[in-house]
Amino acid sequence: MNKIFKSALVAILSIYSTHVFAEGTTINYRLASADETRKLMQGNTEYYAKMNQMDIDWRVRKEGSTLAELQTMAWQQTRDWTDAEREFMATIVGMITDSLNSIGCQLPVPSEIVFAKTTQAEEGGSAGYTIKNIIFLNETYLGMCLPNAERTAEINKIALMRFTELVAHELFHCVTRNSPAFRQKMYALIGFTVMDHDITFPDAITQRMGINPDVEHLDNYAYFTINGTKRRCELILLFDKSWAEASAEKGNQIVFFQFVKPGLVPLDDMSKVYDVTEASDFWTVVGHNTEYVISPEECMADNFSYAVVRGINPATPYNSPQLIQNIITALKR
């Protein structure tokens, strides 16, 4: 590409919103600057209001931290996009759009998706997370996945696929927020029913629950067999230990992902929390394609990303292939 033309193209991309148009699904997106990302974070008041003390301490990495300390730290993590990253993101969104349209899907994507780049220190070093229609991506992981002339073509191809899967995974969260009907349809594929209200948990549980920015509602259940009895249960995320306890044992380089685990709360006795291993049919219900099953939202986001990016072919076998096929079939409707 002509160097002058290439520079002009990048400049245009940095000023105007980027549109990917295709018959069926349209993804309208833009890349937020570091300054805009800070402002977007400052507007995430609902998310911060849901945090308990464990959520705050783990993110600030200090016992007795305040929400103000967390917000100040989070707002310092925003980063600007490089030209290479802008081109890479255009490729990623184009690939996802093409794949969705090859399926024959009209995905209920929000009118605009905003991509923001941060260090992710504000979320324990995760690869990405979402709030509303904003997808926050990890600058280090992004840099690792960019095309690299010092790597083989095959490794670059794998890196591209991995990052495309991440973006598709995070896009799923934005779509389920935008369309309750789509969310209900996707959750039903793994046996979860969405109710018309959020569940209120006892204080003993809420004080230990880990907040997930990708999960806005705890309003669903599935049937799991516990001690031989089918019970309606909500799948939640719990801290094993506080920051103070865990850091005293393992040092201060730990992250909260090492000390959270999923649990099942039966709706007929919400004083109890069962480990998922106590449900004899847990993996039968949610499938075996991903181990990232801390909520139906995350389980289906992974499976959705596989269906969209990898599809069904012999080169990418699945432990639960029927679930992937069911997702593709549902997307066509």
Image (spheres, rainbow, N blue to C red):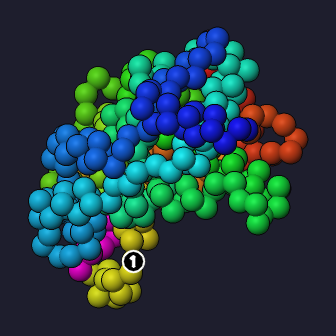
Residue annotated with mark 1: 254
Residue 119: % across, % down: 40, 61
Can residue 330 be seen here? no
Residue 156: % across, % down: 75, 55
Instruction: State the quadrant of the C terminus.
Output: top right
Can residue 16 be seen here? yes
Above or below residue 97? Residue 245 is below
Q: Residues within 10 Å of mark 1 (few under 14, many from 20)?
A: some
**In-image side of 33 versus 292 (left or right):** left
**In-image side of 24 versus 295 (left or right):** right
Residue 169: % across, % down: 54, 41
Residue 155: % across, % down: 78, 59
Above or below residue 256? Residue 228 is above
Q: Name the one closer to the observer, 271 or 168.
A: 168
Residue drawn at (50%, 27%), measured in percent from left and top?
18
What secondary structure is found at the residue carrying circle 1? Answer: loop
